[in-house]
Image (tube, grey):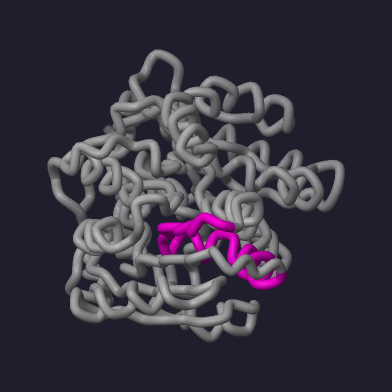
């Protein structure tokens, strides 16, 4: 395995000292090291991957130095436009090192939402004409040559170059910093209370990551099946507009979007779209733990954001905040009574059960059962 400290020394040696991106589970140890050893002005966790490309471009324009952008390969979709229309060698010629976690690598067991992205990632980089090196746990001895090749490309072409990171490439590194939890209630406990309190005919759309896994397991515990829930296992940040599409099409059914702070921040413009169309049956729940819980616990920036005023400005009719179980029970009753769009922010602690499972129903099966439930 590659020690993050060694990798970091190579980066510094080649003049890279600015870091931005969106955390990824395959890069969590490297991201943790960066978080512990780089000052805030040199390390910015971006709202989404496209924004990280723009941040990196700004750093290069101001300093002439090559920045680093980290992301999961699913984030290439968000990064595509600024990579092609901003950083590309046919446009502004902005060099940057892309460090990309290769989820869904062919031949490596992974979740269904990563399989297609993993399969097409090398071809996508080739289509973008971004050269790349594949790094694995066996790449330590060859780092000097890998970095020399990337550095030579930056000097010659002044354009992006990528490191495609396989699973288990980086050696474990624990966070030195401890993020304070916004609330004492766990996200799983909050999800259970919501499911207990909403009506049997209500429709639920849950966000990417552990929230959907916890919802799935609670339905299993209740022996209710999963037809009432659409589990957004991929497409981070888009569950609220999936919910909006359903709410506008089924105005007589209450639609609950169970969202996360990181997901909302990733595509915050969705709040304005929801507020503009203002379906009365739209209920938006944000579990705010201040971190990207599913990929290592890096800060989202949500501790510096007040979601309620943002939602009100965007056009939401009512907003509520819950900080404990008693709060949550009272506020859910108010959410049910009020016409939407309504926002309920729940302050929760970060972390989850170590034995938390994953959905055993395929996305296609989930979709089929869910559509039958909505039709019925």
Residue nearest the viewer, comparing 2 with 156: 2
Q: Position of residue 194 (x, y in %)?
A: 29, 62
Q: Is residue 350 visible?
A: yes
> Which residue does the image show at 51% across and 41% down from the upper left?
374
Q: Position of residue 91 (x, y in %)?
A: 85, 48
Q: Quadrant of residue 222?
A: top left
**Over which residues does the magenta segment extend?**
252-276
Left or right for 87, reference 114: right
Figure label count = 0
**Position of 222 relative to 111 (above/below):** below
> Which residue does the image show at 23% across and 68% down from the upper left?
349
Which residue is farthest right?
90
* The N terminus: image quadrant: top left
Q: Position of residue 258 (x, y in %)?
A: 41, 58
Residue nearest the viewer, comparing 272 with 304: 272
Left or right for 360, reference 131: left
Q: Quadrant of residue 135?
A: top left
> Which residue does the image show at 40% across and 44% down from the upper left?
229
Which residue is farthest top?
107
Whether residue 253 appears in magenta in the rendering, the answer is yes
């Amino acid at each position: 395995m590659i020690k993050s400290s060694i990798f970091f020394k190579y980066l510094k040696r080649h003049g890279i000292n600015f870091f931005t991106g969106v955390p990824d589970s395959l890069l969590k140890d490297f991201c943790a090291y960066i978080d512990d050893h780089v000052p805030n002005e040199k390390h910015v966790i971006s709202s989404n991957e496209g924004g990280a490309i723009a941040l990196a471009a700004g750093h290069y324009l101001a300093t002439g130095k090559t920045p680093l952008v980290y992301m999961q390969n699913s984030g290439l979709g968000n990064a595509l436009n600024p990579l092609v229309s901003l950083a590309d060698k046919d446009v502004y010629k902005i060099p940057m090192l892309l460090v990309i976690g290769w989820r869904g690598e062919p031949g490596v067991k992974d979740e269904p939402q990563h399989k297609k992205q993993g399969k097409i990632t090398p071809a996508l980089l080739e289509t973008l004409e971004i050269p790349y090196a594949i790094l694995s746990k066996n790449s330590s001895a060859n780092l000097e040559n890998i970095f020399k090749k990337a550095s030579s490309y930056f000097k010659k072409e002044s354009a992006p170059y990528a490191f495609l990171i396989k699973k288990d490439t980086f050696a474990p590194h624990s966070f030195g910093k401890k993020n304070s939890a916004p609330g004492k209630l766990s996200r799983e406990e909050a999800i259970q209370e919501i499911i207990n309190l909403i009506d049997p005919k209500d429709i639920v759309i849950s966000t990417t990551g552990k929230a959907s896994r916890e919802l799935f397991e609670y339905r299993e515990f209740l022996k209710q099946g999963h037809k009432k829930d659409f589990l957004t296992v991929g497409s981070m940040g888009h569950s609220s507009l999936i919910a909006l599409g359903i709410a506008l099409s089924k105005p007589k059914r209450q639609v609950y979007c169970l969202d996360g702070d990181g997901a909302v921040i990733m595509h915050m413009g969705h709040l304005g779209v929801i507020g503009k169309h203002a379906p009365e049956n739209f209920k938006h729940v944000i579990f705010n733990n201040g971190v990207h819980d599913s990929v290592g616990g890096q800060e989202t920036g949500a501790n510096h954001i007040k979601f309620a005023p943002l939602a009100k400005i965007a056009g939401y009719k009512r907003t509520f905040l819950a900080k404990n179980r008693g709060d949550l029970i009272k506020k859910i009753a108010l959410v049910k009574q009020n016409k939407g769009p309504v926002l309920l922010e729940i302050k929760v602690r970060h972390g989850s059960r170590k034995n938390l499972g994953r959905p055993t129903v395929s996305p296609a099966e989930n979709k089929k059962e869910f559509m039958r439930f909505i039709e019925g």
